[in-house]
Every structure is written in structure tokens, then in C-alpha cells.
Amino acid sequence: MSSSSNGSGTTVITGLGVVAPNGLGLKEFWTATLARRSGITELDRFDTSDYPARLAGLVRDLDSAEHLPGRLLPQTDVSTRLALIAAQWALEDAEVDTAELADYDMSVVTANASGGFEFAHREFQKLWAQGPEHISVYESFAWFYAVNTGQISIRHGMRGPGSALVAEQAGGLYALGQAARTIRNGVSLVVCGGVDSAFDPWGWLSHLASGGVSVDPDPATAYRPFDVHATGYIPGEGGAICIMESAESARARGVRVYGELAGYAATFDPHPDKGGPSGLRRAVELALVDAGIEAGDVDVVFADAAGLPKLDRAEALTLRELFGVRGVPVTAPKALTGRLLSGGGVLDVAAALMTIQEGVIPPTVGTVTVPDDYDIDLVVGEARPTVVRNALVLARGRWGFNAAVVIRGVDN
Amino acid sequence: MRGTMNRRVVITGMGVRAPGSLGKGAFWELLAAGRTATRRITFFDPSPYRSQVAAEIDFDASAEGLSPREIRRMDRATQLAVVCARDAMADSGLGETVDPHRMGVSLGSAIAASTSLEREYLVLSDSGKRWTMSTDQLTPQMFDYMVPSIMPAEVAWAVGAEGPVVLMSAGCTSGMDSVGHGAAVIREGSADVVVAGATDAPITPIVVASFDAIKATTTYNDTPGAASRPFDGTRNGFVLAEGATMFVLEELSAARRRGARIYAEVAGFANRCNAYHMTGLKVDGREMAEAIRAALDQAKVNTDAVDYINAHGSGTKQNDRHETAAFKRSLGEHAYRTPVSSIKSMVGHSLGAIGSVEIAACVLAMENQAVPPTANLHSADPECDLDYVPVQAREHKVDTVLSVGSGFGGFQSAMVLTREPA
């Protein structure tokens, strides 16, 4: 992504579609994030009274039937509906008229972590409770991990190279990196990002099986990244879809640019038995090189924020090694939404772009006491006015996936 | 770091587990003999289902070197992938010399841990009686069956990769797309070695039922060995299969420097979406033709240099007609002069894995200078009028191969492999 001074080879983001537990649409999400408004509530889609954890970041008050053609409803899981809506909002935000672009010049790249899980669960029940003849004609494609790429590309007539990637919570940033690669390889515009949802009983139990979900029943304290009393994270649904374009394409269309995807890198941790540091630091270093900047140029870090002390500590120490003691503001607005699997990293990128646009860093809500030896400048309390040009967004996926993205403001 | 770099990518190792064959030697032997590995499903009682045949692998995980702990935690598809990855690494002779930071993994799979998910579902739901489930049955693997990125993680652990690692999950083109992606990662300079390939172990009731529901799979249940009939006038659907193949992809000059045996170059890869229908195909093959054109373009290969086409050839009425049209559209008259075959006639359709399995078949075709046949091809279809190498393998010059794939969601992929990098 290293670009020449006149911007050739630059990859920019011109549209954002957000479906978050604390806001439908970019504006509502950002306003709620600055106002410390949480989207974490009791999971009420089934009887959870026997479960040790019952809090989730849920997308409420969104009636898919109001946003999507009726024929798409029976064939889509809730995660695909959210993805289709987010993609539509992103395209509107970027003022894209798909009729004006060549079909092969538009692509879709999404990350997915849990697929159409609730849809699949219903089909499993039909099969085993009633019999094979009850399986839906949609099951063969409503569940698999590429479904959102497929459905978005069909809905909007996008015939360029499409992909679907899985890397748990790191997947969303991987999708943005793959989108940038697709643009470098000649496509003008890519609809990219991640959306996940798995809050049926089987999905919920599977979330709990990760071992990292907090059992604290108080939504104000259950997920408090980097806090000395951190007890885990809260799972959430939703995510974000971006419109990523070559700088030339954005210029030709005369549209507003939120910012640039200036740098990207992905690494994987060493085998657990081998020992040694995680690959997160190396991912950051590679992303900084890719962006053509030094650590000192980074104005804010949107942390992965696992909410588990061991992982929080590892991330904090990595940031200290890279940026020095309290060397850069760090924040985790995901405390208000929960961890959104493939949606998380992309939602953080949306927040980073708004941070750059408005010159204010959103706070990390719920965290009270950061251990001294983390040595991080965590933005807590109120949002912090700060001029931000370069934002670093981090994500770690379960079992060792690391992603680092540098988002840079542009001079419009 | 990234940008236009004149880096080329070659295959220096491979590991294959396909129905009827364990290992690349046995795999080629099956293809060359035109033998079919399709049979009546044995993994569960298929009698309640519309399609009752599959291509299964007689896979003994512990005989393959997996430990009891590995077998317990890994879904079947993961086991296949790890075994193939270890084979590929040994086959490549790479050894300990590679820098782990410069080594990545690109694993394809369409439906990942579906076998384990179904097994787990039966326990959690008491065979479908319960919608809500008890935490008594909670196991740590449950998260990893729902979010299967543990699969490329297991491969990365097996081979020692610490560079970019990902699961590419684009349905039935996953197996080709994952190799194309691995090659792209090397070409752009993000890695020097990528262990790339794919796996799927989908022979489980929910999957069989889901294809039954759209009548995509064959009903030739009384003749399982002759059930998969790509391009044949009497074809009536694909045979579900399992499979896995992993490759070691390397940057060409580094491979040459260490004296690696080079199987083939990944000379070109391109994909498009048909943006038409999640499962349906138009008759004109337009987007597949465009993927083919772009792949040939990247490989700097003329249409008439193609010696052999490895078809998607799933054996559905719509697919075989669609891709025949795509071959004619992209290659013109040369399509009529080029042998085309579908190994799905022999090893079935292993969904996300088959793209990689087919690339292995292409590589072995180059090694043996022979094209595998399309088995079970006896009666003509006027809409499929190319040379599909019926029944018998054929000696043939095979230096430049075109392989294609097509999948649910509209994915259309094409890859060009060449024998000797100039």
C-alpha cells in the first residue's frame, strides 16, 4: 500500500455501512460511541436462565423486511440480512450507482466466522425431528461462509473477483487487506467487511465454549478491557461493510473520502509449544512499513481488547514495546458492543475513520483501573479531542491470527 | 514492500488424500486406470435420502500418524488437511531452512467442520428433540466447529508457519482460490513459501439432505460406480465426496537456488462472480469465460497453447452445459481441439476441496504426459460436444493446463499451470 506522493496506488474508503449493537448506521453508532451508550443487553432470544452467561451485544429494532426484498428473507440467515443491509447502506453512503461502473470492475470481499448458524440450526432440527424431506431448498447455500459475498454480489451485480475469508476476530481486517489486494490487481471498487451473528441456543453455547466469555452478570462491568478486574468478553453480532476504491476511482466519481487504508499486515503466532512472543508486534511493524510511517507517527491505537487478563497484558506489553511507556492513546470502543467476530475489526476501522474525521478519540467504557505495569494510555472517561492523522487498528483471532491495519486521513 | 514484483510461484511439494487413493501415487494410478471410487454411502444409513452414493476415503487417522489427542480434537476435514500438509512438506524437501515468518498458509474449505457439527448436534439436541441445549454437554471444541479458523491454524502448527495464515472459504471454488491466493501472497512479497490447498469432509446427513432438497446430486443409487457421469447425456447430478490436497508453493528463484524439484508453475489465476443466482447458472458461461481469459492473460499464454482442460465437470445438467459454453467462448475453435476431462467422474465432488484435488491431477498429468479420462461417459449430449476423453486415459503432451471451478454463490475460477518455468 505504500503510495507515491500523488496518491497513485492509494486505496481509499468512501462509504461505511454499520450494523452495531449500539447503533444502526454509521451516524447512530458513532454518536452512541462518543456518548458512552452501550448496546449490551440480556440475551432474550430463548430461555437463558440455565446458562452461566446471558449478556450479549445484540442488534435490536432492525426489521429486515423493511430493508430487503421479500424474496431474500426466507433464504437468508440473520447474519446475511445484516450484511446485505450494511452493504446497501455503505453503497448509499459512497453514492455508488452500480449501473455506472463495469460489472467486472466491482468486487465483494467479506469475512465470516460463524456462517448462517441460526439458519443451519433450524435445518438440523428439521432434519432430525421431522425428516430429510423437510430440509429447505435454501439450506445448501444459506449456511456456508461465502454466503454474504455471494448474496451481496448478486444483489448489486458485482462480477469482479470475490472472496470470503475466515480468521475469527481477525477476519474482518484480513478482508480489508484482501480488498486492497484486489484493487491493486486492477478492480476499481470493492464492497468489503464482515458481519456475524450466532445467537440461537447452539450458537450461544458455542460462544460459551470458547472459555473467554465473562460470567459477570452486570453489563456495566462484564467486559472491561485492560481493567485489573477484567473477567472476559461479551460476544456481539453485527459489523460493518466498507466501500473501498482506488484513489482514481474515487476522484473520477467525485465522492467524499473518509480515509486511506495505508498499511496492512497479517501474521500467525508460533506453535504454543515453541514458545516465544506472539506475532502481533511483527504484524504492527510490517503494517507500519507498508504505510511508510514510523511508530511515532501513530496517533491512536484501536486495540484488539480481548478482555482476558493474560491477553490484555500481552497486548499492552506489545504496545509498550512499540510505542514506549504510555506512548500513544489506546482505546477499545468495542466495550460498548462486545466482540463481533469478523465484524469487530471493520467496526473499529469505521470508528477510526470517524476519529480522524472529527478529531476525537472515543473512550473505553467500563474500564476503571488499568494495572500500572501495562503502561498504556487508555482513553477512559470522556471522549478525548485529539488531532489524528494515522490510526492503528489491531485484531487477534483465536489460536494465533494477528492483523494490523493503518488508517490514514486524507487531505480532501 | 508490495506492488509490482517480478516474482513467480511454483509447486514443489504435494500431499493428496482422495477417495480410492491414499497419496499422490495411488491417486494418479486410479485416474490413469479410469477407476471410480464412488460407492453406496457407508458412513451412515443412506436409505432415507434421495441420493445415496458418495466418494468416501478409507482414512485411518492413527495409521496416518495422527495422535489420539489430535484425532480427538480435530474434525475429520482437519485431519485430512494436516496429513496432506505433512506429506507435502516432506515431499518438498524444504526441511528446517525456511524462515517461519516468511511462510504462510492458505487453506480452502467450503463447509469446514460440518461432520463434527452434526455429530455434536445429535448429542446437544437429543437427536433434534431440543432447541435449547444444556451446558452439561459443552465441550471446548464446540466454538472451533462453529468458527473453523482452527483448521488453518492446525496446518500452520503442523508446518511451522508464522506468516499470513487464513481459511479461504468460497464454496466449491475454495480449493482453487486458496492456491491462487497463496500464489498472490508470494508474488506480492508477503511470504516466500505458502502451504496452500483445501479440505472438506461433508459426507454427513445434513449435507446429503441439503443437496437432495435442490436435486443437485445423482439418483443413480443402484449403480454407484457409474453414478458420476460428467458431460454424459444421462447425467443427473453430482456425487458428493470428501477429499484433501495440500501443496507447498514457493517463490521460483528460491526454489531453484535450493535445487527443489519443481512440479509446475502457478502461472495464472483469476476469478469472477456470476452475480446471477446462488445455485443457478446461465447457459452462456460468460463469467467463467472471463475468468479463463484473465488467467491466460496473467500467465501470458495464448489460448491455443492450452494442452488440456481440467473441467469442473460436476455432472449436473446445468454445470456441464455452462462450462462447455465457457470453454468455447474463451478458447474459440481451440476448445474443439483440446482434451477436456472431469475427474469428478472418479473421485466425486468434494466441494471446497476438489479445486485443490484437481490441481493435483493436473500436476500429475504433466508429470506423466497423459490426460485422465472422464469415466462413465458413454452417451452423447448435443450441448456437450467437445472431446471429454471418454472412459480411457490418453497419452498426450501436457505442458500447459487450464483448470476451472464453479461454485454456489456464483464463484467462477480459472487457473493456468505450466510445466517448465522458462
Image: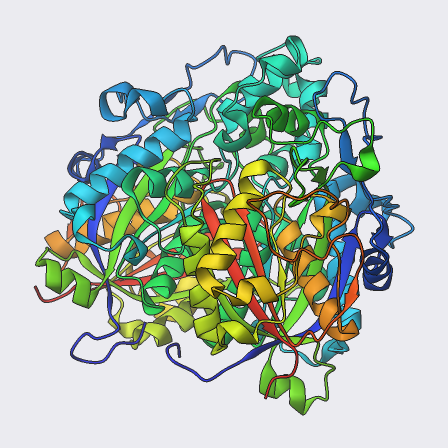
For residue B329, above or below residue A307: below
Query: Horizontally, is A81 left or right of B205 in the view?
Result: left
- Residue A386 seen by the camera: yes
- Residue B164 seen by the camera: no
Q: Residue A343's image quarter?
A: top left
Residue A140 location, x and y as percent?
A: 55, 30
Front-most of residues B203 and B193: B203
For residue B383, above or below residue A59: below
Residue sitting farthest toward the right: B63
Quadrant into which the N terminus of chain A falls: bottom left
Query: Horizontally, is A381 left or right of B188 in the view?
Result: left
Colour treatment of the image? rainbow
For residue A319, above or below residue B7: above
For residue B206, above or below residue A253: above
Q: Residue at x 49, y 58 (%)?
A: B328
Quadrant into which the C terminus of chain A falls: bottom left
Residue A10 location, x and y as percent?
A: 24, 70
Query: Horizontally, is B343 left or right of A200 in the view?
Result: right
Front-most of residues A54 and B397: B397
Residue sitting farthest toward the bottom: B257
Residue A166 location, x and y as percent?
A: 51, 48
Q: Residue B241's image quarter?
A: top right
